[in-house]
């Protein structure tokens, strides 16, 4: 658990400031800083006016310096998206928040897939979701998974490990996000969101899964297991607005 000592030491290291310089700038004795930073258990604290002076010098929140929490990050604690600066990200980690990155690039709830960019995906924000231990948040385009996950939804997903030579190892009937690789190395990869089912043809079940849409306007199609580049199990859906 982070203490005042930990947060103060992190700020000092970040700025590369000496205790003497910090004392001169804040009017707080060097012995006060030495006492705090030498406390192995991290129980030593400062009076409120000194907390405010140090926070002002380092341009951080007094509440965060004193308690490890920050009102500016309350949105994260309330399960809402928040775009973080590098400093806020560090503070949030120091607060012990489990942050789930939200990526810009969508997976498509349709039968044609969503081409994935060659230059990688971009993190556009972070979430905390109570009770959900996801690896990332991804947006959905297309309505093939409506009404379960309509277009514009965001999905909290966790990496599902699988082996192509063990085709029956995944939980069939669940919704997954997955990428499909092209036949040639230069082909684009495509992202899908589908409910995966076991192939009913025994001769094809060892090599193919069935991708099913919850929207009845879309037909099922088969996917070759060896073409799957990554597989993510959907843990929860997030709908923004009405």
Image (cartoon, rainbow, N blue to C red):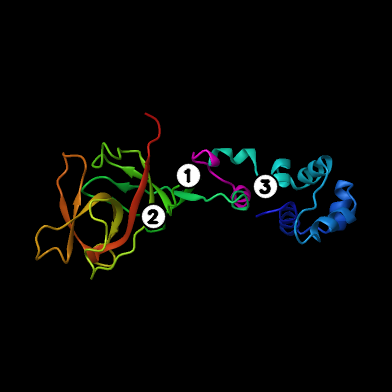
Q: Is residue 70 covered in magenta?
A: no
Give the SS element for disc 2: strand
Bin the neighbour count of mark 3 within 10 Å (Cα to Cα): few under 14, some 14-19, many 20 and up. Answer: many
Q: Which residue is the site of mark 3?
A: 68
Q: Secondary structure at mark 1?
A: loop
Quadrant of the drawing holding the N terminus:
bottom right
Task: Name the residue at 41% across, 58% down.
Answer: 119
Left-right relation of 187 to 159: left
How packed mark 2 is, by other alpha carbons closer than 10 Å (few <14, some 14-19, many 20 or more), is many
- Write the start and end of the magenta stretch as one range: 77-91
Quote the CA–CA distance across marks 1 and 2. 15 Å
Q: In the figure, 48 relative to 121: above or below? A: above
Going by the picture, which residue comes out furthest to the top?
A: 242
Of the two numbered discs 1 and 2 on the same chain, state the one appearing first in sequence: 1
Residue 130 in picture, x, y percent from top left: 47, 44
At horizontal 43% and vertical 54% (from top left) the residue drawn is 135
Q: Residue at x 15, y 49 (%)?
A: 220
According to the image, label 2 marks what residue? Answer: 158
Q: Is residue 84 magenta?
A: yes
First in sequence: mark 3 vs mark 1: 3
Vertical side of 83 occupied by 21: above or below: below
- Looking at the image, the residue that sits furthest to the bottom is 165
| Disc assigned to residue 105 | none
- Give the residue number, with chain letter if any, for mark 1: 130
Give left or right: position of 141 versus 221: right
Q: Nearer the viewer, mark 3 or mark 1?
A: 1
Between residues 16 and 147, which one lies in front from this camera angle? 147
Residue 64, position in %: x, y? 69, 44
Q: CA distance from mark 2 to mark 3?
A: 29 Å
Looking at the rendered image, the disc whose residue lies closer to the viewer, 1 or 2, is 1
């Amino acid at each position: 658990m982070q203490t005042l000592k930990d947060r103060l030491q992190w700020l000092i290291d970040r700025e590369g400031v000496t205790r003497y310089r910090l004392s001169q700038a804040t009017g707080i004795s060097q012995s006060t800083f030495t006492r705090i930073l030498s406390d192995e258990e991290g129980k030593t604290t400062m009076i409120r006016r000194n907390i405010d002076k140090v926070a002002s010098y380092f341009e951080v929140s007094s509440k965060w310096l004193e308690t490890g929490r920050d009102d500016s990050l309350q949105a994260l604690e309330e399960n809402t998206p928040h775009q973080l600066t590098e400093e806020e990200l560090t503070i949030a980690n120091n607060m012990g928040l489990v942050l789930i990155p939200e990526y810009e690039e969508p997976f498509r709830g349709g039968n044609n897939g969503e081409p994935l960019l060659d230059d990688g995906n971009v993190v556009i924000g972070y979430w905390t979701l109570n009770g959900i231990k996801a690896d990332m948040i991804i947006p959905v385009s297309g309505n093939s998974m409506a009404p379960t996950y309509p277009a514009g939804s965001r999905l909290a997903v966790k990496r599902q490990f699988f082996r192509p030579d063990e085709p029956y190892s995944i939980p069939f009937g669940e919704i997954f996000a997955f990428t499909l690789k092209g036949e040639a190395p230069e082909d684009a990869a495509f992202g899908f969101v589908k409910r995966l089912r076991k192939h009913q043809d025994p001769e094809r079940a060892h090599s193919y899964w069935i991708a099913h849409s919850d929207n009845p306007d879309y037909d099922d199609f088969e996917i070759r297991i060896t073409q799957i580049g990554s597989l993510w199990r959907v843990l929860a859906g997030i709908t923004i607005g009405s």
